[in-house]
Image: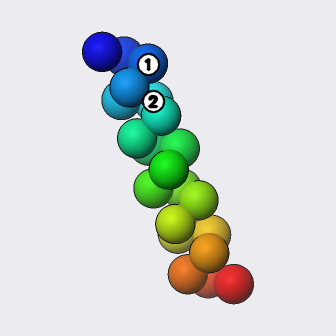
Amino acid sequence: MIYLHARGLYHVLLLICNREL
């Protein structure tokens, strides 16, 4: 559960970085 949650947060982080770029 925690692993999937951390993976989800990481994916969101990548999306935010892509939007800023």
Left or right: residue 17 versus residue 9 is right
> Type of residue at label 1?
Tyr
- x 62%, y 75%: residue: 18
- The part of the image, by quadrant, that contains residue 17 is bottom right
Neighbours of disc 1 within 10 Å: few (<14), some (14-19), many (20+) = few
Residue positioned 50% across, 50% down in the render: 11
- Return the x and y of residue 12 as percentages of the image width and height: 45, 56
Dot 2: element: helix
Residue 20 in picture, x, y percent from top left: 61, 82
In x, y percent, where is residue 3? 44, 18
Which residue sits at x=69%, y=84%?
21
User: Please, what secondary structure does the residue beneath circle 1 have?
Assistant: helix
Label 1 – label 2 distance at C-alpha: 5 Å
Label 1: which residue?
3
Residue 19 higher or lower than 14, as above or below: below
Residue 17 appears left or right of 7:
right
The amino acid type of the residue labelled 2 equals Ala
Residue tagged by mark 2? Answer: 6
The N terminus lies in which quarter of the figure?
Answer: top left
Task: Give yes or no for contact between labels 1 and 2 (Cβ–Cβ under 8 Å).
Answer: yes
